[in-house]
Image (spheres, rainbow, N blue to C red):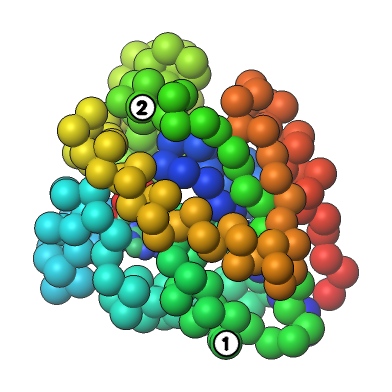
């Protein structure tokens, strides 16, 4: 059976999380976010969470071997047997290579790159509010929830992520340019990528992403 593996690339704050939630629903694919998996480990106080914490707080990438093991464990579960949507992975060329080695030739890999200039990123990230319940993402000015502090989707509490502070954003952007931007080139040469203008409204970005993500007949 061929699996649909949809990969969302983009700088932190480009809108990957927001679009991933909607795309996963629309395509009936499980949403696999390595950032969410790390935060889950952090909140449960697991050994993996302890190892990742220092890197995340500093705005650095967690070392490849920790991320890859965690990701493979997640996508090896039953709900991912028919395909999955990756949000925040791969973030290095080594991660892209490890994923490539794990996939089968008949798997349908689709890559969407949500492009937003750096000048817009800082404002986006520092105003961001995330739901502790379902992972939905809002923005104080651009996409406020109907009720302050409450998630429109699941009613969970909204808060700012520790690493969404102004100090940490610059570091995360630097990590993106050095380590993650080359991943888009890597995929461009191998499977092609669909570039989406992430400065449009969330609905327009969703429409463009949805058009890129063709459903795959199994
Ligand atoms: P995110 O929620 O995707 O912005 O991820 C939050 C943080 O988790 C990142 O700043 C990294 O420290 C860590 N992280 C998430 N995904 C990865 C990955 N694929 N590779 C390395 N670090 C990651």
Which residue is found at the position 23% from the left and 48% from the top?
Answer: 59
Q: Position of residue 165 (x, y in %)?
A: 22, 31
Q: Position of residue 184 (x, y in %)?
A: 59, 58
* 100 relative to 176 in the view: left or right: right
**In the displayed structure, would residue 168 be above or below residue 102?**
above
Which residue is found at the position 51% from the left and 60% from the top?
Answer: 182
Q: Nearer the viewer, residue 157 or 141?
A: 141
What secondary structure is found at the residue carrying circle 2?
Answer: helix
* 78 relative to 61 in the view: left or right: right
Crowding at label 2, few (<14), some or many (≥20) Cα neighbours within 10 Å? some
Q: Residue 122 carries which label?
A: 2
Query: Does mark 1's beta carbon lie closer than 8 Å to ligand 1?
Result: no
* 142 relative to 131 in the view: left or right: right
Q: Determine the CA span between mark 1 and mark 2.
A: 35 Å
Would you say residue 73 is visible in this rendering?
yes
Of all residues shown, which one is farthest toward the right?
217
Which residue is found at the position 44% from the left and 25% from the top?
Answer: 119
Q: Quadrant of residue 2?
A: bottom right
Ligand 1 quadrant in view: bottom left
Q: Where is residue 70 in the image (x, y as percent from the top left)?
A: 36, 75
- Name the image quarter holding the N terminus: bottom right
Q: Quadrant of residue 191?
A: bottom right
**Number of on-image labels:** 2
Q: Which mark is residue 32?
A: none
What secondary structure is found at the residue carrying circle 1?
Answer: helix
Would you say residue 133 is visible in this rendering?
no
Q: Nearer the viewer, residue 115 or 185?
A: 185
Which residue is found at the position 37% from the left and 21% from the top?
Answer: 123
Instruction: Tell me the residue that label 1 is attached to.
Output: 101
Q: Position of residue 198 (x, y in %)?
A: 61, 32
Q: Badges 1 and 2: C-beta atoms under 8 Å apart?
A: no
């Amino acid at each position: 059976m061929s699996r649909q593996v949809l990969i969302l690339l983009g700088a932190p704050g480009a809108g990957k999380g927001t679009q991933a939630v909607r795309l996963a629903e629309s395509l009936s694919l499980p949403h696999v976010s390595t950032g969410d998996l790390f935060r889950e480990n952090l909140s449960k106080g697991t050994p993996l969470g302890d190892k990742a914490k220092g890197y995340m707080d500093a705005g650095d990438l967690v070392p490849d071997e920790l991320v890859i093991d965690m990701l493979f464990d997640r996508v090896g579960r039953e709900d991912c047997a028919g395909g999955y949507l990756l949000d925040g992975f791969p973030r290095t060329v080594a991660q892209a290579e490890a994923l490539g080695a794990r996939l089968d030739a008949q798997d349908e890999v689709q890559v969407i790159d949500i492009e937003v200039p750096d000048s817009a990123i800082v404002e986006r990230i520092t105003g961001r509010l995330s739901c502790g319940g379902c992972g939905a993402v809002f923005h104080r000015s651009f996409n406020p929830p109907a009720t302050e502090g409450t998630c429109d989707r699941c009613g969970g509490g909204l808060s700012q992520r520790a690493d969404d502070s102004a100090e940490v954003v610059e570091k995360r952007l630097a990590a993106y340019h050095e380590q993650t931007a080359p991943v888009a080139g890597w995929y461009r040469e191998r499977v092609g990528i669909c570039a989406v203008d992430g400065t449009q409204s969330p609905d327009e970005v969703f429409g463009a992403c949805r058009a890129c993500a063709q459903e795959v007949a199994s």
